[in-house]
Amino acid sequence: MDDTDRAILDLESRTFRFAGVKWQAVRAMGLTRTAYLVRLNRLLDTREAVECAPGTVNRLRRLQGR
């Protein structure tokens, strides 16, 4: 898991009043919306992500019905 993966988990742990703010942060990381979502979905299947941010990963898994 690299720094970008950790930044993705950090971003997902936050709440945003406006959705556009989140996507601005994604663009600031140098990712497109699609690339971000693909990477996030792959990340949710890793043990390292669960160890790094268990609450965030489990919440996102629940939302996806996993």
Image: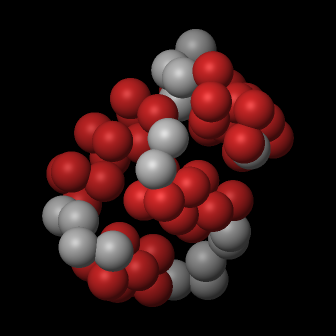
Q: Residue furthest right?
A: 55
Q: Residue 11 location, x and y as percent?
A: 57, 66
* Residue 23 in view here: no
Q: Residue 64 location, x and y as percent?
A: 53, 27
Choose between 10 and 65: the one closer to the eye: 10
* Residue 43 in view here: yes
Residue found at x 33% / y 42% = 39
Q: Residue 15 location, x and y as percent?
A: 68, 71
How many callouts does the rendering have? Answer: 0
Q: Indicate how the structure is coloured in the image.
A: secondary structure
Whether 54 is drawn above or below 7: the answer is: above
Left or right: 38, with 15 as reference point:
left
Whether 54 is drawn above or below 22: the answer is: above
Residue found at x 54% / y 23% = 46
Q: Residue furthest front?
A: 2
Residue found at x 38% / y 29% = 42
Q: Residue 44 location, x and y as percent?
A: 53, 30
Quarter of the image for residue 31 reads bottom left
Choose between 15 and 32: the one closer to the eye: 32
Choose between 59 and 31: the one closer to the eye: 31
Left or right: 13, with 55 as reference point:
left
Q: Residue furthest top?
A: 66
Question: Which quadrant of the rendered structure holds the C terminus?
Answer: top right
